[in-house]
């Protein structure tokens, strides 16, 4: 099994849908470090495992097993993300890498993991700082969309009218 599939498998093993995160947190006998409680978090972790696995296959082809990953490869992965991710996203990736290590430890208990994620440093984002997502849609574009949505049996049109009149942004 290749490295990408190993990481994905570890994530799937740690899915705890149906378990109560709140109850587990209050029960000191339950280890929650490896559990994935929500579908959104699971999707994020699968995306990370695929991305990290692909990075390792391309840049570190000698790594065949998840336990062979070191903090040096993880730092190189994080550094490669600095050009395309903002600081908050980089922080999220760093946090998810720690969770992925916990998932791998749970999925492959006989392996010895020493990823040393606590030694990783958050790189400075070099993504274009001038790029702003929350600029309002120009009024002429809003009018065109509103005109096109009139007469349609959809709540999308109503939502767009409301956002245009209150000068909200569309993401």
Image: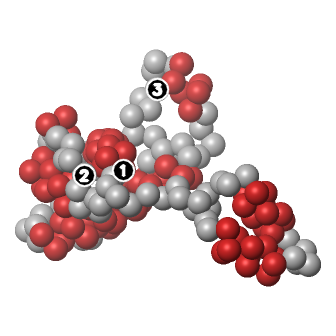
Is 98 situated above or below 74? Answer: above
Please identify, in this view, whether the residue under mark 1 or under mark 3 is nearer the observer.
Answer: 1
**Secondary structure under the numbered disc 2 in the rendered image:** loop
Q: Residue furthest front?
A: 140
Disc nearer the start of the sequence (2/1): 1
Q: Residues within 10 Å of mark 1 (few under 14, many from 20)?
A: some
Residue 152: quadrant of the picture: bottom right
State whether residue 141 appears in this view. Answer: yes
Report the disc number at residue 125: 2
Asked whether the beta carbons under mark 2 and mark 1 sit within 8 Å of each other, the answer is: yes
Where residue 98 appears, as percent x and y from the top left, is 29, 42
Where residue 68 appears, as percent x and y from the top left, is 13, 55
- Label 2 vs label 1: CA separation? 9 Å
| Residue position marked by numbered label 1 in the rendering | 89
Left or right relative to 70: residue 7: right
Instruction: Please name the residue shown 14% across and 37% down the image.
Output: 119
Viewer-nearest residue: 163 or 33: 163
- Label 1 vs label 3: CA separation? 29 Å
Q: Residues within 10 Å of mark 2 (few under 14, many from 20)?
A: some
| Residue position marked by numbered label 3 in the rendering | 30
**Secondary structure under the numbered disc 3 in the rendered image:** loop
- Quarter of the picture containing the N terminus is bottom left
Instruction: Please name the residue shown 63% across and 43% down the image.
Output: 18
Please identify, in this view, whether the residue under mark 2 or under mark 1 is nearer the observer.
Answer: 2
Where residue 64 appears, as percent x and y from the top left, is 15, 66
Disc nearer the start of the sequence (1/3): 3
Residue 165: quadrant of the picture: bottom right
Where residue 50 appears, as percent x and y from the top left, is 34, 66
Viewer-nearest residue: 13 or 54: 54
């Amino acid at each position: 099994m290749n490295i990408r599939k190993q990481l994905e498998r570890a994530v799937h093993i740690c899915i705890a849908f149906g378990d109560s995160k709140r109850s587990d947190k209050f029960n000191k006998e339950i280890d929650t470090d490896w559990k994935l409680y929500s579908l959104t978090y699971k999707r994020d972790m699968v995306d990370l495992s695929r991305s990290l696995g692909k990075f390792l296959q391309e840049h570190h082809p000698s790594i065949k097993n998840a336990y062979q990953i070191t903090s040096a490869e993880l730092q190189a992965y994080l550094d490669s993300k600095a050009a395309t991710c903002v600081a908050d996203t980089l922080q999220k990736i760093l946090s998810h890498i720690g969770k992925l290590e916990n998932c791998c430890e749970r999925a492959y208990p006989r392996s010895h993991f020493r990823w040393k994620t606590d030694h990783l440093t958050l790189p400075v984002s070099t993504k274009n700082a001038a790029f702003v997502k929350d600029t309002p849609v120009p009024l002429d574009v809003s009018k065109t969309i509103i005109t096109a949505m009139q007469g349609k049996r959809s709540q999308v049109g109503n939502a767009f009218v409301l956002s245009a009149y209150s000068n909200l942004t569309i993401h």
